[in-house]
Image (cartoon, rainbow, N blue to C red):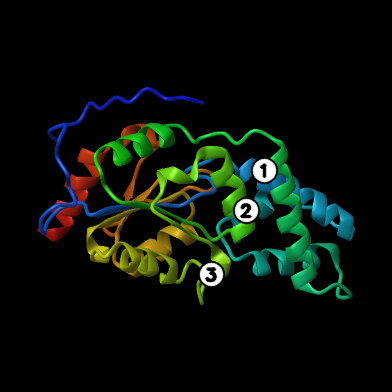
């Protein structure tokens, strides 16, 4: 899905580099599932299939309660739903990862509305950006093979940090790798768990709810779609936070 790049806000000059100097936007950190790509439906289908194999039933409400959470926790909930105690949660997590990966690699991967346009603008302005996901490396690589790894300076997967979201580890690691203060980074997230991770890191957080509603708060900005976001908007949010 290709989305035209438009902006109705006060824009920055075309040659502006917001990460230059010591103020304003220094980097953009994208979450993956439900923020960059429309993969939450893929996760739901895989969760339903794996839970059915265990003899249980998984519903959209179950997904909403667990969206953005560590996969080991999701696996334990699946086992509870199925009333199983004879299968290790690690095996369920492995099976779920495999099911999602197979679907990502064989089916189309769709951009979330506005995500491609924003990513293109971020790249065009020379603003560093990274992909920061709670999904494991095998799933991150499956998505990157579809959308283009060249859009990102690097990616961080959930199995590469000591503590998964809502812990801030992945976002702090991303800012450190780029070499910028986390307070000058804009984190884009769709789930309450991811939003909490961004907030805990000290970054400026923009929430784009997908599966679960997210309420506005002083520590975050909530938008309906990334079609409402451009580099100038993110730069302004960072500068407002800086006072």
CA separation, marks 1 and 3? Answer: 20 Å
Binning the other alpha carbons within 10 Å of mark 1 as few (below 14), some (14 to 19) or many (20 upward) gives many
Q: Would residue 230 be seen by someone viewing this image from the given angle? A: yes
Q: Residue at x 31, y 61 (%)?
A: 178
Identify the residue position indicated by label 1 in the image.
Answer: 104
Q: Hey, which quadrant is residue 243 in on the image?
A: bottom left
**Where is residue 18 drawn, in percent x and y?**
17, 47
- Circles 2 and 3 in contact, beta carbons < 8 Å: no
Identify the residue position indicated by label 3 in the image.
Answer: 160
**Where is residue 189 drawn, in percent x and y?**
43, 51
**Where is residue 97 drawn, in percent x and y?**
71, 57
Q: Determine the secondary structure under disc 3.
A: helix
Binning the other alpha carbons within 10 Å of mark 2 as few (below 14), some (14 to 19) or many (20 upward) gives many
Q: Residue at x 76, y 72 (%)?
A: 89
> Residue placed farthest to the top in the image?
4
Q: Hey, which quadrant is residue 6 in on the image?
A: top left
Quick check: 85 above or below 157? below
Q: Determine the secondary structure under disc 2.
A: helix
Quick check: 222 above or below 203? above
Q: Residue at x 14, y 39 (%)?
A: 16
Q: Nearer the viewer, residue 19 or 57?
A: 19
205 with respect to 132 (left or right): left
């Amino acid at each position: 899905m290709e989305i035209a790049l438009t902006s109705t806000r006060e824009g920055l000059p075309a040659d502006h580099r917001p990460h230059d100097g010591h103020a304003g936007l220094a980097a953009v950190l994208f979450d993956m599932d439900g923020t960059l790509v429309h993969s939450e439906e893929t996760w739901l289908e895989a969760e339903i299939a794996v839970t059915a194999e265990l003899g249980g039933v998984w519903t959209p409400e179950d997904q909403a309660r667990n969206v953005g959470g560590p996969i080991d926790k999701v696996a334990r909930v699946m086992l509870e739903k199925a009333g199983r105690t004879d299968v290790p949660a690690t095996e369920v997590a492995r099976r779920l990862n495999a099911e999602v990966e197979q679907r990502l690699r064989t089916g189309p991967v769709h951009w979330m509305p506005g995500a491609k346009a924003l990513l293109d603008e971020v790249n065009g302005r020379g603003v560093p950006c990274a992909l920061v996901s709670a999904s494991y490396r095998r799933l991150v690589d499956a998505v990157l093979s579809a959308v283009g790894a060249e859009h990102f300076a690097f990616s961080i997967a959930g199995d590469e940090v000591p503590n998964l979201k809502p812990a801030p580890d992945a976002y702090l690691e991303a800012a450190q790798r780029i070499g910028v203060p986390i307070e000058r980074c804009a984190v884009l997230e769709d789930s309450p768990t991811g939003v909490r991770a961004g907030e805990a890191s000290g970054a400026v957080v923009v929430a784009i709810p997908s599966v679960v509603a997210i309420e506005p708060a002083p520590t975050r900005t909530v938008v309906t779609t990334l079609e409402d976001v451009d580099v100038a908007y993110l730069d302004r949010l960072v500068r407002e936070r800086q006072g």
